[in-house]
Image (cartoon, rainbow, N blue to C red):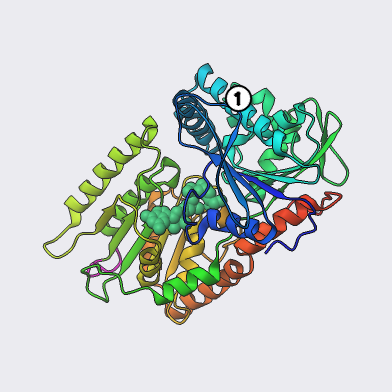
Amino acid sequence: MTSDTRKGRLIVLSNRLPKGDVPAGGLIFALHEALSGAGGIWIGSADPTETADDTLTPIGSGAYDRFTFSLTEAEHAGFYLGYSNAVLWPLFHHRSDLMEITGDDFDAYAAVNARVARALAAMLRPDDTIWIHDYHFLMVASELRKLGVGNRIGLFLHIPFPNVTDVLALPQANLLAGWLAAHDLVGLQAQRDVSAAFDVLRQDGEVQILNDGTWIRAGRIFAIRSFPIGIDAEGFAKTAAAAPTPELLLDPRAPLLIGVDRLDYSKGLVHRFEAFGEYLARRSDPHMRPTFLQIAPVSRENVAAYQDIREELERASGSINGAHADLDWTPIRYVRHHVDRDRIAGLYRRADVALVTPLADGMNLVAKEFVAAQDVTDPGVLVLSHFAGAAEQMEAALQINPFDQGSFAEAIDRALTMSLEERIERNDALRKGVFEQDIAWWTQTFLNRLSSASISYDGGAEV
Ligand code: GDG
């Protein structure tokens, strides 16, 4: 997969790494493929313990080696639950109102980033390439540079980039440009994220943009570009085609809408439930009795904002079902546990409509999985929020503003009554992008760009 021009080992750093079998599909699978092709090292976080030190613990080897870095319970609370998920995550999803800022959490974040950098530096060879993933490790590259590391370092941020005014809510706002500038390449999901990052950099007195669109800060040149992440489209399409018919206890012709999301306030689930409720209240065909199946496994339960969203959602589904349900019809089915991947694939294929309507989202892979899973001769309709990074690539989706409940409800009606001809036309256009810009394309494009001797500018995006 990685036919890039890199010479040394690839070293991947991500918070999660496979500790046993590698799950099919998804980011973990893509990184596994990249490392399997080229050999290298994958570093991720260990389960928290009482004490922590700078050594990396080997947890498996094969085509590549896996290691974990250690962290204490207190660091896990401050670094992971605190600064990563109760400061950076809400801030980068335009929800600074949900930030829980404490100095101790930042200290834990800085300490864990510095420890990871020391552990990494101790094992580096001169021609190794480092690929850092996500907001948990924004400071690792700058810590590595302080230790004298000159290796190529790339960062891919899976979440949206905050705008200039959002960033002011971060007590460490003045450090952000320096953290970014320590990389050679910063990859973002969408071009809108690149624009936001450019605006933030322009506020930093030490950063200058060069003629070729790269940036310079304290003598270091770095680039910021978009690399929209894809999925294993071929693999997912095969899984969906082979999946057994889902056991839904539904009339086989009853219209089915589906949503699949981690339970997170950024995914817009309450807005989605309410828009579906409004659709039910004024649907064009009162005889149509669709079922909306929302799968939303709980995540980050120890962060307060996640408990609130869970309660809000339960209230919303209860009141909508209370208003519309009948003896033989439950309009909203809300499943809070994890469902197997092949069952999800089969459900996408069976569904008439997917509601992928986040309020903010780096990309959103569900939009792409739904398209890959469709029967091309009788495809379902993708209703997609403007605020998913995927909206930039997936123009043929029925795009909506999740904050405008009335037009969202109309779009649901339109999706459920769309002609076969229009469904096929839209799906064909979407499918092309999903299959061409898949996960292999993404990995290769990022790594090629990172390893290219001169990082040059030709418009700010790889698309
Ligand atoms: C971040 C960014 C970006 C969900 N529930 C179940 C299940 N899922 C799978 C879906 C999909 C994945 O989880 C979720 O994908 P998202 O793209 O919505 O991801 P986030 O977790 O928010 O991740 C996001 C992504 O990184 C990649 O860069 O797209 O914007 O926020 O694959 O299918 N899968 C199974 N059972 C479930 O119950 N099997």
**How many residues crowd around disc 1 within 10 Å: few (fewer than 14), some, or many (20 or more)?**
many
4 in relation to 298, above or below: below
Residue 251 location, quadrant: bottom left
Q: Position of residue 421 (x, y in %)?
A: 47, 80
Q: Which residues are magenta?
A: 283-289
The residue lying at 37 percent from left, 48 percent from top is: 269
Q: Position of residue 57 (x, y in %)?
A: 56, 38
Q: Main secondary structure of the magenta part?
A: loop
The residue lying at 73 percent from left, 50 percent from top is: 9
Asked if one can make out residue 139 in the rendered structure from this viewpoint, the answer is no
Q: Say what secondary structure mark 1 lies in.
A: helix
Between 213 and 398, the one lying in front of the other is 213
Q: Position of residue 123 (x, y in %)?
A: 70, 38
* Amino acid type indicated by mark 1: Ala
Residue placed furthest toward the bottom: 377
Q: Is residue 123 magenta?
A: no
The residue lying at 28 percent from left, 53 percent from top is: 335
From the image, which quarter does the N terminus lie in? bottom right
Residue bearing the label numbered 1: 110
From the image, which quarter does the C terminus lie in? bottom right
